[in-house]
Image (cartoon, grey):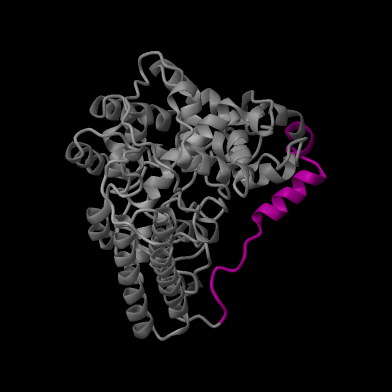
Amino acid sequence: MKPVRLLLLILPLLAACAASPNRPSGTNKEPATPETLDALYQRLDEASRRHAEAASLGEDEARAQREAARLDLQALAARCAALAGCDTARVFGTYDRLLAEGAARAGDGDGLAAAEEDRGLTLAGEHESPVLGHLPEASRSINLLAGRELRDVIELNGPVKAALNEWLTWMRPNLVDAFENYQMLRERMWPEYEQAGLPEALLFGILAKESGGRVHAVSRAGATGPLQFMYATGLRYGLGQVDGFDTRFDPRLSARANVLYLNDRFAEFNHNLELSLAAYNGGEGRMLRLHQRSGGKPFWHPDVYWQLPPETRDYVPMVLAAAWLFLHPEDYGLEFPRLATGTTTLRLPRALSINELAICLGNGGTRAGWFRHLRNLNPRYEAHASIAAGTEIDLPSAALPAFEQHCVDGARATLAAEIAASRQPTMMAGSSGGAGAGTYTVRKGDTLNGIVRKMKCGSVSQLAANNRLRGPHYLIRAGQKLKLTGCGRS
């Protein structure tokens, strides 16, 4: 869960046309001829083109051209909302894309960028698709906690169907990976939901969207763990530092905190599932104020939906769609792989790292090997860190024969130890500044937290201070060079 930076530039637009997507039939709108609408769409395309062409200009000129294009689009959106027959989805979708590109240039992303080993977690960029569909006009009440099945709660409206399209096309591999990861985590997370009387499909939907089942996921904003809690929110729900371990990484404790958080939101929002999920993504304070200002209207009502930032408008239907697919995979030709999910506690006969274990275990009949499951089952240990002999770790039961055959001793154990111990040079050639100094060029998908771990820096705050990065987000961009004062592998 993470705070979403509400782009204040959109507020005048939303205030002007909060009820614009689907006005009741009795609402007065200005009549518009096909010629009038064609002219508006041409201006829309022209403004979008000028915004894109700004990338080829100098910094100051580009900023001015983008701002002019944004203002044009804002005026066009407000005009479209007042015209009968205007395609609001097209206009608002263009505006959403513009705002998303602006956030990406600022390095803010969508709040779901994982640590460097978790490629593919960020759901932004060229694949981003604003979830715009026909929104139901009638308000409704969802009582999730009074015995209703989740399949009867989820409404397959336009936004949810658009999210199904995302999961079943370019994001299908992400969904399948999330399901595999969840199977191994299930015995740790599901009991918390079961005891609370919450549906398992909802847990999977949140997990799939938040982290893809990657326990060590960390966002650019600092949201952490399989269910992406911010530090302050985690503290309120029992998560924090225990013996140097951030329990937001613990799947069982994270699931328990998630249940407590959702139950608090259900109490605030009359058990409205969508509003509770929106609060989980965008912050309960914002959602409670919006709920009160709207007179208690549901999430899908235009007075609520269009007051939310694009990320939250995307997040809620994506969670609902993933939960729906968890319940109905066969209807969509979706095949979730089934794993042998038992685990065993193993006392290490010698010092080993997670990386070394993943190498010596091999694929073992799995699709992608055991690395992710080893990480998820043992969240206290960094992948590269040597775990002392005699330490108890959790191992998938299906991997135990391979461990006994290849990881205790022998040729593969030796190769695994050699490969896992190898490291790329920490400092760039020609760097100056003495021991522990050098530079690092930021790559696409990097996070400051990931760089701190990879380059063995003291802390995020120390690296940020050395490079004059301002908190709390410590934004970085691809190509940026960071000074590595005090960093180095020990």
- For image coordinates 53% across by 38% down, the residue present is 213
Q: Quadrant of residue 291 in the image?
A: top left
Q: Quadrant of residue 288 in the image?
A: top left
Q: Quadrant of residue 195 in the image?
A: top left
Tell me the magenta residue range. Answer: 403-429
Vertically, is 228 above or below 476?
above
**Which quarter shows the N terminus?**
top left
On screen, residue 332 versus residue 275, left or right, reads right
Q: Nearer the viewer, residue 102 or 12?
A: 12
* Number of marks: 0
On screen, residue 376 versus residue 279, left or right, reads right
Mark yes or no: residue 433 visible.
no
Mark yes or no: residue 177 visible.
yes
Q: Nearer the viewer, residue 59 or 144?
A: 144
- For image coordinates 48% across by 46% down, the residue present is 217
Q: Is residue 328 magenta?
A: no
Vertically, is 259 above or below 65?
above
- Residue 459 percent coordinates (x, y): 38, 58
On screen, residue 400 versus residue 83, left or right, reads right
- Residue 352 percent coordinates (x, y): 63, 43
